[in-house]
Every structure is written in structure tokens, then in C-alpha cells.
């Protein structure tokens, strides 16, 4: 952060478990990717935060999926501009999901998006994993009371 923002004198910090609760509870994730020409692209995505990562599915033909096939780096931002949570990382195609983990992903989708979207546990078991992608965080920043509690995380 630039000098003058007061971040270096932050006296409160947010625990990662609190940030993860925000990520679990969020209904919408803003996903930022980069096009081949270097221009930005941002899209709202539904997804579930499990196992320390964001799991989200969709067509391999979408702009963001094509962007990520070229450059897997991305950023996520949650809906709130007051309780800010920004995660930078990589979005990679998932391996096919099966068993207990597939059941957990399906249950979390149903909890968050049902009855509109309730995929079954086999929705991501095919060779292309049903278009499932996974964002693995590299770093994050969060705050609720800027600049008093700005907290950075590296993974």
C-alpha cells in the first residue's frame, strides 16, 4: 500500500479463518482474468469454497475459461466493498470429482444455490470434469475497517 494510507500502522488483524468464512458464505465471486491481448475481463461466478480453494463449473467456451487456458493467473473479489476480500491465485481445470469429495461439492452447491442449481455428485466425474475449475490462492488481502485491519496473506 502507498505511504499515507496508514496500513503500516494497522493495529488489528483479521484471522484467516474469518476470511475463509467470508469465502464459504459468499454467494457470488467476481473473477478477473486476462485476455490474450492483455485486456482485463471480469465475470461474476457461482462457486463453493472447500478444501482451501474455490471450485466452480461452467462451459469451457466462456471468455474467462478461454482466458485461463492461456494464462491461469486470476483474482477473486467478493460482493462486499465494506468487508473486502481479494484472493489472487491460479485457476486450473479440475481432475474428475468422485466419491466423498464430489458429494461434498454437490451438497455445498445445493446449500448455496438450491433449488435453482443442485448438481448431482456425478456432475463432474467425466473426462472434462464437467467444466469444473479450481482456484488455488497464492495471496490474499482482507479488511473490514480500512486501514485499521488490513491483513495480507501468502500461501
Image: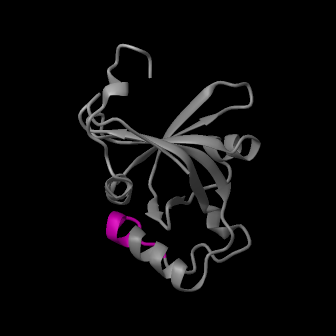
Q: Is residue 115 visible?
A: no
Q: Is residue 134 left or right of residue 142?
A: right
Q: Position of residue 51 (x, y in %)?
A: 50, 68
Q: Position of residue 52 (x, y in %)?
A: 49, 62
x 53%, y 44%: residue? 139
Q: Residue furthest bottom?
A: 99
Question: Is residue 87 or residue 120 the one in the foreground?
Answer: 87
* Residue 135 falls in image quadrant: bottom right
The count of marks equals 0
x 40%, y 76%: residue? 107
Question: Is residue 7 or residue 145 the one in the foreground?
Answer: 7
x 29%, y 37%: residue? 149
Question: Is residue 31 or residue 10 the one in the foreground?
Answer: 10
Which quadrant, please, contains the N terminus?
A: top left
Q: Is residue 25 visible?
A: yes
Residue 43 vertical position relative to residue 105 in the rendered view, above or below? above
* Residue 35 falls in image quadrant: top right
Q: Is residue 82 left or right of residue 140?
A: left
* Residue 128 falls in image quadrant: bottom right
x 37%, y 40%: residue? 142
Q: Is residue 117 magenta?
A: yes
Magenta stretch, overall SS: loop
Q: Position of residue 153 (x, y in %)?
A: 47, 45
Residue 118 vertical position relative to residue 69 in the rendered view, above or below? below
Q: Which residues are magenta?
A: 110-119
Amino acid at each position: 500500500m502507498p505511504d499515507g494510507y496508514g496500513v503500516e500502522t494497522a493495529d488489528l488483524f483479521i484471522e484467516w479463518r474469518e476470511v475463509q468464512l467470508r469465502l464459504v458464505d459468499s454467494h457470488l465471486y467476481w473473477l478477473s482474468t486476462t485476455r490474450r491481448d492483455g485486456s482485463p475481463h471480469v465475470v461474476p461466478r457461482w462457486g463453493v469454497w472447500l478444501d482451501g480453494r474455490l471450485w466452480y463449473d461452467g462451459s469451457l467456451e466462456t471468455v474467462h475459461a478461454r482466458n485461463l487456458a492461456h494464462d491461469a493467473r486470476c483474482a477473486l473479489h467478493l460482493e462486499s466493498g465494506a468487508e473486502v476480500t481479494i484472493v489472487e491465485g491460479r485457476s486450473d481445470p479440475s481432475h474428475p470429482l468422485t466419491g466423498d469429495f464430489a458429494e461434498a461439492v454437490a451438497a455445498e452447491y445445493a446449500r448455496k444455490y438450491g433449488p435453482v442449481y443442485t448438481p448431482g455428485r456425478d456432475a463432474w466425474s467425466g473426462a472434462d470434469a464437467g467444466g469444473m475449475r479450481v482456484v488455488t490462492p497464492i495471496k490474499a488481502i482482507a479488511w473490514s475497517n480500512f486501514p485499521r485491519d488490513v491483513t495480507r496473506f501468502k500461501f
